[in-house]
Image: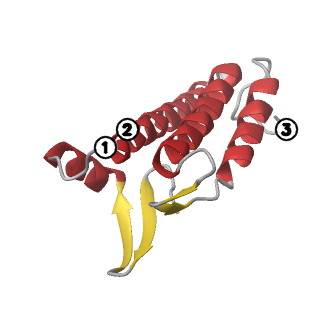
Amino acid sequence: MAWPFWRYQETYFGISIISIIRDLEILLSGEITGKTTISLLVWFTGAAILAAAILLAAYDILNEETHNQVIGLLVCGFGILFLISSSVQYGLLFSGPAGIVIPIGFPLTIVAGWWIWSRGDEEPVGEPGS
């Protein structure tokens, strides 16, 4: 299972929870090459975009401003990048020698991003009833 900032992995060697920091360390050390490197770089980019969306939402709440359309686009971009990362690693059918992946979060992310975007910039994020 891949989450934005960590992965849960079951292998013959046991169960691991791998943080984004550990993945970055492994990537920079050269232990990972090929399509996994590309997949992880796309995944890191998606995680950075999600972090930007979260920080912008927090800024909006603290300053009673709205950037809903920008946040919505960032969330949708995050979802699309995670789908691309999965397809790079596992193939277009999400099944290959590396295993299988079921991108359950992709439609949920796109719907959440669209919902945030559709709220427009009329109402502050932190106000009740918004």
Question: What residue is at 69 percent from the left and 35 percent from the top?
Answer: 126
Query: From the viewer's perspective, is residue 27 above or below residue 116?
Result: below
Q: Is residue 117 visible?
A: yes
Give the amino acid at mark 2.
Ile
Question: What residue is at 56 percent from the left and 31 percent from the top?
Answer: 62
Left or right of 19? Residue 88 is right
Give the amino acid at mark 1.
Gly
Mark 2 lies on residue: 38
Question: Marks 2 and 1: in contact by CB < 8 Å?
Answer: yes
Badge 3: how crowded within 10 Å, few (<14), some, or many (20+)? Answer: few
Badge 1: how crowded within 10 Å, few (<14), some, or many (20+)? Answer: few
Residue 118 coordinates in the image, percent (x, y): 81, 25
Q: Mark on residue 34? A: 1
Badge 2: how crowded within 10 Å, few (<14), some, or many (20+)? Answer: some
Question: What residue is at 64 percent from the left and 53 percent from the top?
Answer: 103
Question: Marks 3 and 2: in contact by CB < 8 Å?
Answer: no
Mark 3 lies on residue: 129
Q: Nearer the viewer, residue 128 or 6?
A: 6
